[in-house]
Image (cartoon, helix red, strand yellow):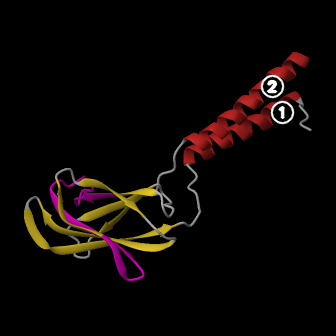
Amino acid sequence: MINLNRGIERTLKYFGFLAVLTILVIPAYADQVVKSTDKGTINVGFSTEPANPNPGEQTQLKISFLNKQNSIQPHIDYRVSVIQDGNQIFGIPVTHTAEGAVSIPFQFQNNGTYQVTVEVEGILFEPIPPENASFTVNVGTGIPEFPVSAAIVLAVSVTSIIIISTRSRLKIP
C-alpha cells in the first residue's frame, strides 16, 4: 500500500507540474476581430500581440485584408492611424502590401483606450475611394488572456487528481 501511495503521489505531482507548465508556457493570443469597411468593399482583420498590450511594451498591430470569401486579399494599398482622446499619435502614409497581411510594430505610451483606423485606398493595383475600418485597443487593463488549452489541461489534471485520490482513499492534509 505504501508503494501505491508513492506512485499516486508522483502522479499527482506530475499532473500539477504539467498544469502549471501549460499555463505559463502557452502564450495568449487575442482572436482576430474582423470588420467590413464602412462602404463594404473589403473586410479587415485586426488583433494585437500581446493580446493585452501594456504601456512601454512592444506591440504588434496585426492587420489582414480579407475578400468576401474571408480569404486573404493580396495587393492592398492602405494607411493606418492610432488615435487617443481625439489626437492622432501615430500614422503611416499610404503603403502597399503584396501579401495582404501586415504586422506593424508600435509602442503604446499610456494606459487608456485607443482607436486604430485602417483605411483602404486600393485593391489589386486599382485605386478605390478611401474606406475605413476602426478597432478599439485597451492598453494597460491588466486582464490577462487565459488560453483555452491551459484550461483544458487544468480541468483534466484536477479531475485526475480527484479520481485517483477517491479510488486510493488518499488523504491530502
Would you identify the image quadrant in which residue 18 lies? Answer: top right
Q: Mark 1 and 2 residues: CB-CB less than 8 Å, in contact?
A: yes
Residue at the bottom extreme? 86
- Camera-near label (1 vs 2) is 2
Main SS type for the magenta part? strand
Q: Quadrant of the N terminus?
A: top right
Q: Does residue 1 appear in this view? A: no
| Element assignment for label 2 | helix
Mark 1 lies on residue: 165
Q: Does residue 149 appear in this view? A: yes
Residue at the location (51% across, 50% down)?
Answer: 28
Side (left or right) of 116 relative to 43: right
Q: Which residues are magenta?
A: 62-90
Mark 2 lies on residue: 8
What amino acid type should be assigned to the residue bearing mark 1? Ser
| Residue closer to the observer: 136 or 149 | 136
Would you identify the image quadrant in which residue 80 lies? Answer: bottom left
95 inside magenta stretch: no
Label 1: few (<14), some (14–19) or many (≥20) C-alpha neighbours in 10 Å: some
How many numbered marks appear? 2
Q: Indicate whether 3 appears above or below 161.
A: above
| Residue closer to the observer: 59 or 125 | 59
